[in-house]
Image: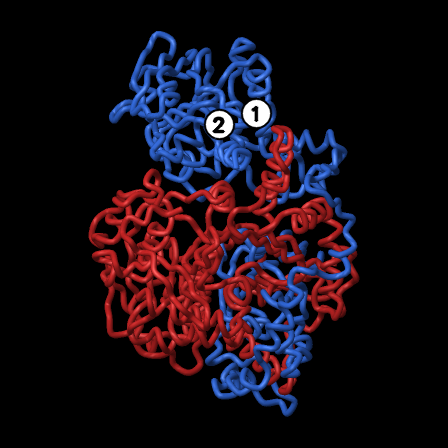
Amino acid sequence: MSKNSFNAKINLDVAGKSFEIFDISSIEGASNLPFSLKVLLENLLRTEDGANITADHIKALASWDPSVEPDTEIQFTPARVVMQDFTGVPCVVDLATMREAIVELGGDASKVNPLAPAELVIDHSVIADKFGTKDSFEQNTDIEYERNQERYRFLRWGQTAFDEFKVVPPGTGIVHQVNIEYLARVVMTRTVEGTLRAYPDTVVGTDSHTTMVNGLGVLGWGVGGIEAEAALLGQPVSMLIPRVVGFKLTGALPLGTTATDMALTITEILRKVGVVGKFVEFFGPGVTTVPMANRTTIGNMSPEYGSTCAIFPIDEETLRYLRLTGRNHDQVALVEHYAKKQGMWHDPSVEPRFSQVVELDLSTVVPSISGPKRPQDRISLSDSKNAFEKIIPTYLTDKTAQGEVPAGSTRVKNGDVVIASITSCTNTSNPSVMIGAALLAKKAVEKGLKSKPWLKQHLPQDPRW
Amino acid sequence: MVKTTLAPGSKVVTDYYDRADLTRYMEALGFNLVGYGCVTCIGNSGPLPIDISKAINESDLAVTAVLSGNRNFEGRISPDVKMNYLASPPLVVAYAIAGTMDHDFETDALGKDTAGNDVFLRDIWPSPQEIQSVIDSSISSEMFTKDYATVFEGDHRWKSLATPTGKTFEWDPKSTYVRKPPYFEGMPKIPTPVTDISGARVLAVLGDSVTTDHISPAGNIKADSPAGKYLAEHGIDRADFNSYGSRRGNHEIMIRGTFANIRLKNLLLDGVEGGFTRNFLAGGEQTTIYDASVAYQAAGTPLVILAGKEYGSGSSRDWAAKGTALLGVRAVIAESFERIHRSNLIGMGVLPLQFKEGETAASLGLNGTETFAITGITALNSGGVPKELTVTAGSVTFTAKVRIDTPGEADYYRHGGIMQYVLRSLLAE
């Protein structure tokens, strides 16, 4: 229950419903805060308890000085928690154990539930044991179930036993994609003490690429299991008021370049700038031209930049994406009205106060790859052969064979591509690159090209694959 | 031989591939669906064909992987592959056709067409208009509503899992993956007052920049480690040990892995690396950290850890704090703490204390063989948080800063940890 020292509680009427909201415009200094800090400010206003979250914290955040080193600790209460199966299992084990403990102390087991909505997607356990055949997916899923039965039985129990806890079963999707395409509310609604309340969707996740949802204007990042547990038990996560780097986008991507090229370019730039522990927020006229699929790819790679988050404000493109992915009309209307009322709607003509500004003219992005061992080591595709020839000697040892060596019925040599994988949350929810890949495949097949070395079907059947 | 895989993050992808009739072209190049999940990106690329793997290892070849992922650290993708490149999905397909990283798409042909003409990447690169027209004709919001309508239901495998019902879980006593941790054993309804610590021994003396990687188990489980022995005793074959990551639901494994990193340097021992310490109940003999902890806990001896600067840096790992608590460590005295690990320690009921500015274990003349007493934390019982308290170590007495930084953290500590705190609040409702 908020102490509401700033008298910020007002009503917002949208689509025939009335929502209680905490209006940040009543706080001095709030109007030109970065989008991300406006979201945090609302969070503190709504959770002000006078002890851990105080009026002084709210004032400190609203009057944030972008140039100072972070030293003010605040308590952030995320609206929900997302988990993947590797890191999520211990959280659910602890909840299950709490249920027994409360019974032993004379309480009711059904009282122990996540206090903030928690959703777990089982995506980390599938292994590409089988590949290249029609039934690879079915076979891999069978093996996955065999290996992980004990964990899956447990999670399935949790799915039915707890309120506010949902499990997306194996073979469905990757947590961050399920998050952007389905779970993210962008604006949350919840009935608190009989009153319907609306507030920004915020999230912590037990996976570092949780920042993918930043593309939709949902503030959040990856945390360790104990912070996630704290959040799902309704407890705040402590953090310092961060520095916020403004990333100004101008221009538009040239023909033939992709979201991946842009994300790799941003990775290279931000690693040089140094954004560890900072928020990165995109602004400027170029933001409007960046489709949501590309925004989420950019948000996804925040851990590669080193930043806590890499966020876009809410705008027309956010609404278009919510409609495309089938979110209901009233929810989309609420997102629009809430964001506009709170000053969280992107205005290309306003430059919020930032600790530092970095700029990228999108028209300068070129086709790129990164490697061979760090995401920030971007290589222009036009220079890829040259760069490869320069680096390969550092990977060769006295034992390394020169030239081709026999490998069963085929031959293999240094530099050969042995794994080519369309994988990862980063890109596979991005229709333009996924359809681009498939159209390229179509044209290649029509011209009679094949994947190297055309020999897979000749290889002896090995029981391992 | 290219291991080609397609692992999208959502079923919508295969839906629009099907609707645009593009699946068959991806399959013709070997990009068959292998699963909806993280797969290659987190190293679940699966084994390479055995002949290829053998040739690579016998001839120590530097072969490559190309993936449309976000991370490519050495060794992450496959143990056989030294060099990993990130690229867009269309470039992944292009490299599968090229078959080598030693390729200039501008001047090197990808192959020849049926008429014998060279084909270059530019000849098959789709135009933005072509891509947009397929997007427009094959992606619709109905696809999302249909695929997500049943998102929590799962397939026949999920539905046919023999699952216990009931409000509490029926733990399988034989499970080596999911076990009930002892956090609440003997927990009283009302918290007992915070007590000072006395008669404590030192489990480890650590230097600067000890990371959560050093503290918390990760990666493979070694057969001769305490965790490996536990699994063997429970009838698990070495081939099925799996990783610490997959066994995070079993505290028995995770405690045994805590401080078991092979690069940990415990200064209680000279020149020894790994999860070892001295057991002062047995004359200071060298033993594993886990075995020493068992002996100390049996004798009711509390434990402390002495550390240098930036203790607990690195990414937050829940088991770094949980494992520390379950080993019986009551306090960590460090020159400085990484913020999140410090708060996690309190969340697990372990007291973080900081040497005064300019002081270190060495400057105070401590070598870890001393018996420790920590007095003054009982001030928490009267509502406030003491800023400092007194530590006596053998014949040395010094003042340490109490790093309980917020009122919320003080409540967690009074209750023995965050879970106990929340549990009691729920009970009181």
Q: Which chain is red?
A: A
Inspect the image, locate mark 2, and give the three-letter code of the amino acid beneath it. Gly
Pick out the residue farthest to the bottom: B115
Chain ID for label 1? B
Inspect the image, locate mark 1, and give the three-letter code of the amino acid beneath it. Met
Which of the pair B270/A164 is nearer the observer? A164
Which residue is disc 1 drawn over?
B187
Chain B appears in which tint?
blue
Upstream in sequence: badge 1 or badge 2: 1
Residue A297 point in image, percent of width and height: 46, 66
For the image, the number of numbered tags is 2
Q: Residue B239, can we see it?
A: yes
Residue A330 point in image, percent of width and height: 49, 72
**Decide: marks 1, 2 in contact (CB < 8 A)?**
yes
Quadrant of the rendering where the C terminus of chain A is positioned = bottom right
Q: Helix or strand or loop: what does disc 1 sit on?
A: loop
Q: Is residue B223 left or right of residue A336?
A: right
Q: Which mark is residue B79?
A: none
Q: Helix or strand or loop: what does disc 2 sit on?
A: loop
Kindly report the distance in space between the C-alpha atoms of the residues bearing marks 1 and 2: 9 Å
Chain ID for label 2? B
